Each structure stands twice: as structure tokens, then as C-alpha cells.
Amino acid sequence: MIKKLAVALLAVSMLVSTAACASSTAATTAGAAATTAAAETTAAETVAELSGDVIIDGSGTVYPLMAAIAETYMVEVQPEVNVQVGRAGSSAGFKKFIPGETDLSDASRAIKQEEIDQLNENGLNYETDVMEIKLALDGLTMVINKENTWATEMTKDEIVKMYLSGSFNAEDKVLWSDIRADWPAEEVKFYGPNENHGTYEFFFESILKKADMVKTVNLQQEYSTLVDLVSKDKNAIAFFGFGYYVSNQDKISAVKIDFGSGPVEPTLETIGEDLPYAGFTRPVFTYLNLKYAKEKPQVLDYAKYVVAQGAAELAGETGFAPLPMDQYEAYLAELNKIG
């Protein structure tokens, strides 16, 4: 009987001990789960706490990239932040950035000294209050009508000569046969973006070396208008950023450019400062008002997203060649010093 009693007592003791352990384990598990949930809630609250506007304007060339970055940021990162992206043109964008109307200014060319002087005059020290961010690389693209089967390949010198005023006659009435004798004796219709755009300035300053452009050139504000005009005229030729060509390949064709070593098609694999399409490659930028970045958390957070993730991930999708990651990381390190 004593043995039976001892065994019974031992069994009861083991049951109580097991129950206590289970209770302790459950409490520990519940506590861990609660802690995790609390952490997740805090993280969610942190992500959702930013609000307000981020105002951007400037380059029409950069617009597809910046608009894609902004959309992804608002959907996936900060739904309460309203990122507004305009496309007035690089020069027009700086005119808004200088008096402080925008937080960032996109540009398809570097800021000019006269614009830096105007910033300084308006109380924004360029050296300490503005950050130049190189976003990606673009390839200036010459586009023609789908029915144009003769000018699918041209040399850089031919492009320059045909766009220069007075190359063939005083009236600048240029025929395709003036460029190559076996091409049609039909008048070339010249198109391009207007003076508001950095693409115009790049073409005028870097390609034409500031020489007068043909008098017959039709310059437009909207790139969509240029695409439409070229798509409807078999004698048309125009220049703009690679991204607009990529998104309209069904309507227009790109001219392969011979820079001296054979015709090169603009692609993400050829566009680069040390790649075959280097002759028409240029960097594109955004300029950040650092005073606003320090005053407005949403502006700083968006700028960090642009360099940490947005530009690298979305450049290729919007027709730009991304930069090496270490360049983006260097920008992020500078922004992290702010906060």
C-alpha cells in the first residue's frame, strides 16, 4: 500500500510539474508573440507617421524615372506623403527651385553658373544648401518615322551637319539627298524639344558646340507631341532622351549612330560614359534643397529612398542606365548625416 501510495504521489507531482512548465512555456510564447506584435505595430506606426508634400519639377527627360520612383514610394513606403512630379523642363524647373518653390529640381544637364549665382542671391548657398544628385545615365536618341528605311544608320558628323544652320543653303531647306546622294530628294523635317529643356541645351551646347540650329527646326515643349509629329511624317527626324524612344518603339525608330567604329544602336547595354554610345551619353540629375530636407522629414525621407533604392531599381525600367551602387551609397551616407 505504501508503495502504491508513493507511486501515486509521484505521478501527481509529475503532472503538476508538467502543467506548470507548459503554463510557463505558453506564457513565454505569448509574451514573445506580444512583443513581436508590439514591435511590428511600432514599425508600422513609424512607416505611416510621415505626411505632407514633396514638390518636384524640372526635366521632361527625367520625368518618367522620377514619376516611377514617386509612385512606388507613395504605394509601398509612405502612403500619407504626396509626391508631386512636374515636367516643365530643366531650365523652367530651376526657375522654380531658385526662389524655393520646389523641394527637388530634376535636370537633364548640370546646373549652370548663372543659376548658382541666382540661388546665392536668393539666400540659398549652393555649396551648403543644395545637393546635386546624379540619378542615372541617358542616351540622346535620334528618332525617325517607321517608313524611313534609308536613314536608319548615320554618322555623328552627318547628324551635326544636317542640324547646323547654313550647312547646305541659306534657307536651311535640307533634302535627304544633300546628306547622301542615294537618299530621297525630299525635304528633311527637323524636330526637337524647346529651350526649356536640358535636352535642347545638351544638343545645342555639347553636340552642335553652340552653333546656330537650322532655321526650319520645329521645337516643342511636350515630348509626346514630338513622338506624334515624327510618327506621322516619313521625312521627320527628332532628338530626345532614350526613355521616350523606348516607350514609343511601336511608333518610331531609332537611328544607329556611327561614332567612328561602326553604327551603334542606343540600348541599356551601349549607353554609358565608357561604352560604345558614349558620344551621345549624358548624366541626368536631381537637385535637393537641403534646408527643406532638414525642415521637412518627408523631403529627407524621399531623397533617401531615391538614392537608396528608387533610382537603382527603376532606372532600367524607364530607359536609363543606372549608376554603380557605390555612387548611390555615397549620396545616402551624406543624407544620413542630416538625420
Image (cartoon, rainbow, N blue to C red):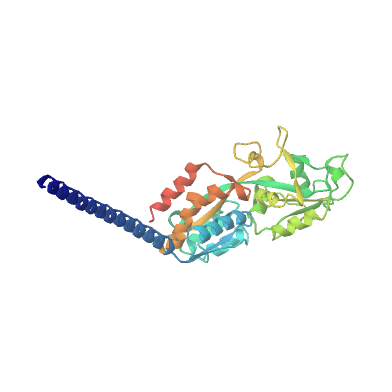
Q: Position of residue 213 (x, y in %)?
A: 74, 52
- Whether residue 206 is visible, yes or no, is yes
Q: Position of residue 188 (x, y in %)?
A: 83, 50
Camera-side residue of 138 and 101? 138
At x 17%, y 50%, the residue is 13
Camera-side residue of 237 and 313? 313
Q: Is 179 rendered above or below residue 104?
A: above
Instruction: Farthest residue to the top: give it.
Output: 261
* Total numbered circles: 0
At x 44%, y 58%, the residue is 300
77 relative to 196 in the view: left or right: left
Instruction: Farthest residue to the left: give it.
Output: 2
Q: Is 80 rendered above or below residue 162?
A: below
At x 67%, y 47%, the residue is 140
Instruction: Farthest residue to the front: give it.
Output: 1
Q: Position of residue 190 (x, y in %)?
A: 78, 52
Q: Is 184 rendered above or below residue 44?
A: above
Instruction: Farthest residue to the right: give it.
Output: 185
Which image quarter holds the C terminus? bottom left
Q: Position of residue 205 (x, y in %)?
A: 65, 49
- Whether residue 164 is visible, yes or no, is no
278 relative to 128 in the view: left or right: right
Camera-side residue of 257 and 67? 67
Camera-side residue of 7 and 162? 7
